[in-house]
Image: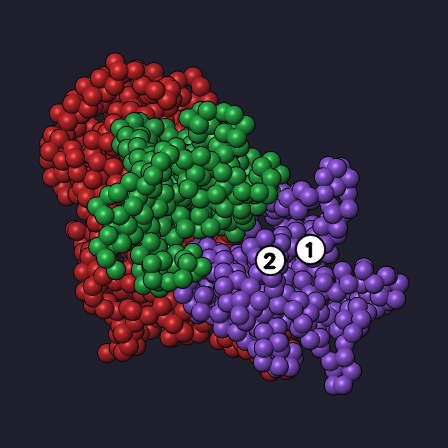
Amino acid sequence: MERIVQVHKPAAIGVRRWGLLLVGIIVAAALPLLLNSYLTSVLVIIGIYCITTVGVSLLMGFAGLVSLAQAAFWGVGAYVTGVMAVSFGISPWLGILLGMLISGLLAYGLGWITRNLNGHYFSLATLGFGIVLNIVLIEESEWTGGSSGLMGIPGLSLGSIPLSGDSAWYYFVWAIAALCLFFCKNLVRSGWGRNLRSMHASQAASESMGIHTGEYRLKAFVISALFAGLSGGLYACYMSFVSPAVFNFDMSIKFVIMAVLGGLVSIWGSLVGVVVVTLLVEVLRQYVPLLLHNSSSGGAIEVIFFGVLLVAIMVYLPNGIMGIFHKRTSNLRVSAK
Amino acid sequence: MSGADLIQLIVSGLTVGGIYALISVGFVTIYNVNGVINFAQGEFVMVGAMSAASLVSAGCPLWLACIISILVAAAIGAIVQKIALHPARFSSEVVLIIITIGISTALRGIAQITFGSNPLTLPAFLAGEPVRLLGAYVPRQDFFIVGITVITMVLLYLFFEKTMTGSALRACMMNREVSRLVGISPNRMALLAFGLGAALAGIVGVSIAPVSLATYDMGMMIGLKGFVAATIGGLVNIPGAVIGGLLLGLAESLGAGLISSGYKDAIAFLILLLVLVFRPQGIVGAKSGKRV
Amino acid sequence: MTEALLEFQGVTKNFGGVIAVNNNSFQVKEGRVVALIGPNGAGKTSTFNCITGMYAPDAGEVWFHGEKINHLKPHKIAELGIARTFQNLQIFTNLSVLENVMVAAKETRKPNIVASMLRLPGIKSDEERAQMLALEMLELVGLTDRAQVLANDLSFGEQRLLEVARALALRPKLLLLDEPLSGLSREEVKGMVALIQKLKKDGLTIFLIEHDLSTVMEISDHIIVLDFGSKIAEGRPDEVRSNERVIEAYLGRDVKKQYEAPEGKRGEREPILTLKDIHTYRSTIHALKGVDLQIDKGSLVAVIGANGAGKSTLLGTIAGQYSPKQGTICFDGKSMEKVPAEIVSRRGINLVPERRGMFAELTVEESIRLGAYPRIGSLLISAEEKRRIEDEMEQMYQLFPRLKERRKQLAGTLSGGEQQMLAIVRGLMAHPKVLLLDEPSLGLAPLIVEEIFDRLYQLKKSDMTIVLVEQNAKAALQIADYAYVLENGRIKLEGLPNDLMQDSRIRDAYLSGH
């Protein structure tokens, strides 16, 4: 071969990007010092959500599957960590790992059953799974505390130093979130990610080139469940209290919205989406009661808002916020049949 | 278990089965014409139930409230199809699924605001003591439910088999491209199918409201069960949808007799998993398998 | 004596009554270029799909390199060394040209996920090796300087080459090419042919489907001919070319009955449907390249031509299924290019589609009744109109008595000939001003073809305007008043049927393709 072609190396990050990244890190690191405790805790929650949403973004944007069970896997992670610690005295670190493992196994089972079926069946199976899990959490109140929830989940400690205070949690959670973003970004850019994207363009051709599409979908699902399980475990330790009301269908939808609004074209979309949605929730919480003179319907307004928002995004801006910046399309628009 | 108990379970199973059948028919129609699983189907049931309940408590006569509620459900279905699904009709599966999820969420929120968070009740249409039938006690409302179900099925049958529009809708479900060649407008059929599906759900809502309390979040569970029923039937045609509904109702009723009531709702999900593992194309089973 | 690399043994595949592959057996010997040819609907792509695992045969076995493969899934078969391209192009539009080819590389087929997340050196070197392989393949087909371009942005010809490069990256032992020349310019065809010949020289076994028969004759060692799902001939190119059955399959057979020569010259009747400079695209393929057509009222106009000539696209454009990019369609004084199919049918142009277009679960009766749908103005029909429709249905039964016997039967269970009759009747119920028929003789036994063509002649005699697209040129010309020959999206010849039948160019047009 005479010519050496300059090939795009996926890992290359230009100087400008490095600069932006550095600025971003400095700002992020300074935030807890500048903001009050409440806002810092909001940022911690954003970080925890982000971990789940990255998995959702991978699953929906690249594997093309809509899972309505992410909050359920989140719940599995949270409850396993909580129950292990409270009922069996197992260290929360181990509990978190166990939670991840069980989430992954459940996802594997569910994914395996639906592996040859089209996306509609998959989504509905995940919906069913989420509902059943909620039932289990409520029914098995001996372990889980039932509808009132599980209290007294111990926090995490690094060695003998307990992780306490919102600032400490902030740095800890965001370090993990950054790692998750980093790993997912690498995965999407790698050969594995390329194969996944090829499936999205043409499943038939992908299979004909040797790609076992069913296996790729299954693995993407399991990865998303692992992330959700991790996120749940961290949530449990941070809040030291979990209840079934948090891990319901509405939460699964919130995760979907975060991923979609941020933009499924890029893994960064998950970060953008979580931030924007959390901001929107806060704004709604503050101002809607003023408009309506009735604070009790606040929750309902939020629900309506997000339902309409979801539809509007899908119809008018299917590639989300990141889609405005990113040139690569994510094949959400298919030409006329 | 005594014979009377068994009959009791079968009767209530068939009653509930009829309900599931109606929702399932709506699902299958919408799926075959619009190409989307309507996640909001359960919400239309809720709209029917809640509208009827609040109209009645506002003083409206029962029969009028029912009719209005069904029309409201159908109208909302038509509107939703026009503004949310029609613009996105060329979009991928992922987008369509998400849109119906968004619709379902929005409807739930709107219901919560319009009707409040507290459960509403609807007086039973046939008041009085349960009737003794072959040794089992059957609540009077159940007769009403079965009656409505049967009447609706008959009307559906007449519509699909004996009218041109019904035949056109069936043709559109079977072969969209060719139906255009026979002058059938796919857009009109998509609107009709969705409105019809929503109307069926509304009928279900109105008939079950007296039996189970009407709450703004009742839609999800019943919608899911309707989908399970449709899957058992095979998602290809209407007779399959009906069979699926009846079977699910029976299975749930007989199963609940054996398991603790808290897990009753999980039976449907278990059946779904079993069907997906062993016979994903359902009982009727598509020959081409393209649905699955 | 070369070994059989691929062996088909008694393979059958049917789809709900339609037999796509009918108990076929053949061999593809190693190192050869074998072509699979046959008229439309012969079962060629279905055969490919049985080889690559997209279809599981209902009967029979497929052997590759001594291994039975008919129960394996597509990705497994690819791993064993069978690669394919697609007739309708299935490139990964969201990836670059280079990435498209890399997907097929073995080095990156099953990368370790954790290692990918951590960007371990092992993954990096796998990527580099895959890239080297991909560049090599792109070099082979001549796309090296397009490596970074998004695949969607390539020209059509380049996309065809990309599919070949991608398939080659599998390092296959057997390469299946599904219509690799279709839609290519003359230059591009030369390039593709040179590539195929080079690959053959390098020892690759190639199995290809093609309509361009002159090229096929040039480059193949062995040809297999299919018709209606069955193998009707095979052998060396010169053997096949002069085989009676093959010629008949392509050109058709005489209909026994003699029909009168068409009365009146062109221009004596007024045109009811006119097409001017119609250009239609089917996805990226330029299917119709400036077609002019004039259909006179009350006449039967035949449009004949080889496969891939654009006949179905032509009818589909008239019927409103495809919107032409350029050109005008004038019907009854109104312009119709932008009118969607459902409205076109209501205005009086009704298409009887290729392969019948049945509503499988409607009965014969219901299907016929539904045929009147385009006539109905509103949702409710008056009792009088209902009665009129029922009367007309009785008349239809007289046209094809066989349907009357089967009136309660589901349309999907009828035989091919009965379905065709049903489709025609359904079209007639709309009271069309122009009836379009797309290959009505496809897959039908000669006796049935005779019956159907006889009815069409009767209809023409009763002043119905008919446009008949047919592969069976001889039968079509016998009942036509005027005929057009379509080749590669253009009208090559037109004239009175008698004149055309004498013209040797028709035979060439059919059997040469370019």
Residue A245, numbered label: 2
Q: Which residue is pictured at 78% across the width and 39% down the height?
A: A290
* Rendering colour (chain C): red
- Chain painted in green in the figure: B
Q: Amino acid at mark 2?
A: Ala
Horizontal arrangement in the rendering, residue C110 relative to residue B141 (left or right): right
Observer able to see residue B122? yes
Residue B44, percent from left and from top: 48, 39
Give the answer, above or below, for where C443 lies relative to C336.
below
Q: Nearer the viewer, residue C147 or A209?
A: A209
Q: Nearer the viewer, residue B233 or C55?
A: B233
Residue most extreme to the right: A34
Examine the image and state in which quarter residue A311 appears.
top right
Residue most extreme to the top: C384
Q: Nearer the viewer, residue C232 or A280?
A: A280
Q: Which residue is pictured at 13% across the width and 25% down the height?
A: C398
Q: Nearer the viewer, residue B53 or C422?
A: B53
- Chain painted in purple in the figure: A
Residue B132, percent from left and from top: 26, 43
Residue C37, percent from left and from top: 28, 55
Q: Quadrant of the C terminus of chain A?
A: top left
Query: Which residue has dot 1 on it?
Result: A273
Q: Badge 2: few (under 14), some or many (20 or more) residues near its Cα, within 10 Å?
A: some
Q: Which residue is pictured at 76% across the width and 76% down the height?
A: A163
What SS does tag 1 mark?
A: helix
Give the answer, above or below, for where C216 lies relative to C201.
above
Observer able to see residue A58? no
